[in-house]
Image: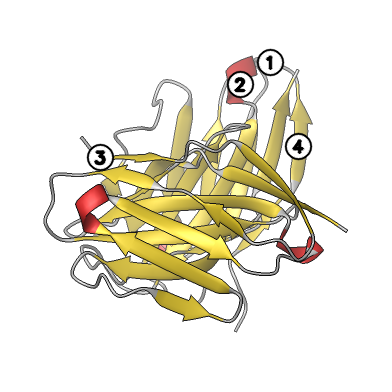
Amino acid sequence: EAGVAQSPRYKIIEKRQSVAFWCNPISGHATLYWYQQILGQGPKLLIQFQNNGVVDDSQLPKDRFSAERLKGVDSTLKIQPAKLEDSAVYLCASSLLAGGRGNNEQFFGPGTRLTVL
Amino acid sequence: AQKVTQAQTEISVVEKEDVTLDCVYETRDTTYYLFWYKQPPSGELVFLIRRNSFDEQNEISGRYSWNFQKSTSSFNFTITASQVVDSAVYFCALFRYNTDKLIFGTGTRLQVFP
């Protein structure tokens, strides 16, 4: 079974530029998550989708970050414009079931490492 | 408040030593799950174990073992006879039962030297 795919793996941009990340979850997984992991910290949830609807985006800086999940499958996360503090690894994860089940294991992709200069 | 504390930032051991990674959590929920993940240099998070709040039995899987103690809100992870391939960052995480949210600790970087 193929895992969660993300691209690109690495991205270097200058501040105020725009950037987009792509995630392809495991086939059939209902829930998709985007996490931000700043160096030396644990991952922090940015946004959670269930199928193609947003379940939780309370931690997403909506003035510059946006995300969508078209047709309930692939997802893109965009930053526009980027700031220095956005330098981090952006992890995508997916889980099989839809919401509220504690045994709903999340499978993580390899992440995209963003450096903002 | 939901919180996970991993007080050990970095641990270095020599191969074949045993090492314990500490995890202390805070929650007011009566039903929750605890996880350990491994993050090797490649970056992806690898699931190691899930334990629900009603199951305090310790678990052993090969060289890995986990000690869950609700009385002290701890879920510690021990690697026996460590190997160089165990070098990674290890995260403990708390999962609230009625949500899909994982709350991660700050991680412990384990370096195993040959």
Disc 1: host chain: A
Distance in Å between CA atoms under marks 2 and 4: 12 Å
Check disc 1 and report its element: helix, strand or loop.
Answer: loop
Instruction: Give amino acid for label 3.
Output: Gln
Q: Is residue B55 above or below residue B30?
A: below
Q: Is residue A74 visible?
A: no
Dot 3 alpha-carbon crowd within 10 angstroms: few under 14, some 14 to 19, many 20 or more? few
Residue found 23% across the figure and 73% down from its top: B55
Residue found 41% across the figure and 76% down from its top: B59
Look at the image and tell me in which quarter the N terminus of chain A lies. Answer: bottom right
- Residue B31 percent location from the top left of the image: 15, 61
Residue indicated by mark 4: A11
Residue indicated by mark 3: B2
Residue A15 tag number: 1
Q: On the image, which quarter does residue A50 sit in?
A: bottom left
Q: Earlier in the sequence, mark 2 or mark 1?
A: 1
Dot 1 alpha-carbon crowd within 10 angstroms: few under 14, some 14 to 19, many 20 or more? some
Distance in Å between CA atoms under marks 4 and 1: 12 Å
Q: Is residue A77 above or below residue B41?
A: above
Residue A82 tag number: 2
User: Is B66 in front, or is B90?
Assistant: B66
Disc 2: host chain: A
Distance in Å between CA atoms under marks 3 and 4: 33 Å
Residue B107 shown left or right of residue A61 in the figure: right
